[in-house]
Amino acid sequence: MAESPAISPEQLARRRGDYGFDAPYVPITFAVIGVALLGLTAASVWLFNQPVLAVVCAIYAVYMLLSAGSYIYTTRVGKFHVWAGLLTGLRLRGDEQAADLGCGRGAVLLMAAQLLPQGKITGIDLWKTMDQSGNDPAETRRNAASEGVNAQRVELLTADMRDIPLTDASCDLVLSSLAIHNIPSASGRAQAIDEAVRLLRPGGRLMIADIRATSAYAEQLRQRGMANVQVRNLGWRFWYGSPFVAAKLVSAEKPM
Ligand SMILES: C[S@@+](CC[C@H](N)C(=O)[O-])C[C@H]1O[C@@H](n2cnc3c(N)ncnc32)[C@H](O)[C@@H]1O
């Protein structure tokens, strides 16, 4: 019987590749606003003699700069630790067939691939650089090499996750991290959730981490007859700036 290699969450979270920044314009905007507010704070004290305005600007400046720091921490470090815990917690056999919807430069795709030495994982993406800096399948392949992942175990498909060119019931595991919310319409996100359900075999497992619409995903999964549908907060390591933009995990199983 196949067996997933014994890799601890700490080992799995230690990345050698470069996975870019999720939606890079967001932390840049936070930092620019924070610095501008610091300037306004100084001007309120030294030029306008407005101490109340200075205090308000200083509070917002600190908030914006902390938000930029939290965002950068999550996208560069935190999400890897959270996903390493989630993936090792699945206790995979190691020969599963998996898919990652919106895999980008491979943050989750390649950690999962390391737990599937006899299996295979397919990454589906449109490689949008607005959603992840430097997003390109060549970067994902370079990261696979940096992580020592056998390229034959990873397939990359340029496709929309609303219409995935994979056969029904071909996956034991479907993953998605911070990707489905990028589809602007609720009907489009619902199509992506239906595609995830379609890809799963009976007994297959689904894990979606996202910052918006997670209760809608869960509701749809229940309507489609998925079992053990749960939503839970993923903690401060998966905050994109503040607790107001916290990622949640939607997990479910396809009934046998
Ligand atoms: C914030 S990035 C997250 C990437 C990766 N999952 C991670 O956690 O690092 C979102 C990804 O979703 C992809 N994406 C957005 N809309 C998509 C769609 N309709 N179909 C496939 N991929 C899409 C983007 O190209 C991007 O790679």
Image (cartoon, helix red, strand yellow):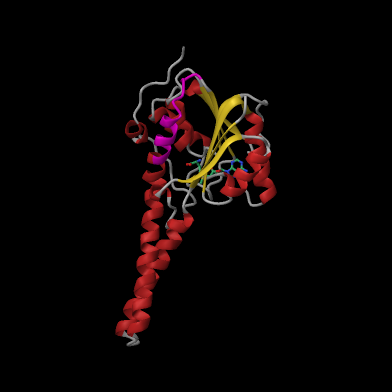
| Residue occupying the point 48% across, 38% down | 105
Residue 84 occupies which quadrant of the picture?
top left
Farthest-out residue, front: 228
| Residue occupying the point 32% across, 87% down | 49
Of the pair 79 and 156, the residue shown nearer to us = 79
| Residue occupying the point 42% across, 21% down | 4
* Residue 120 visible within the image: yes
Residue 2 left/right relative to 180 = left
Residue 198 pos. (x, y %): 66, 31
Residue 194 occupies which quadrant of the picture?
top right
Residue 185 pos. (x, y %): 67, 51
Say which quadrant the C terminus sits in: top right
Magenta segment boundaries in residue numbering = 82-95
Residue 46 pos. (x, y %): 29, 84
Residue 107 pos. (x, y %): 45, 37
Residue 160 is a magenta residue: no
Of the pair 233 and 115, the residue shown nearer to us = 233
Ligand 1 visible in quadrant = top right
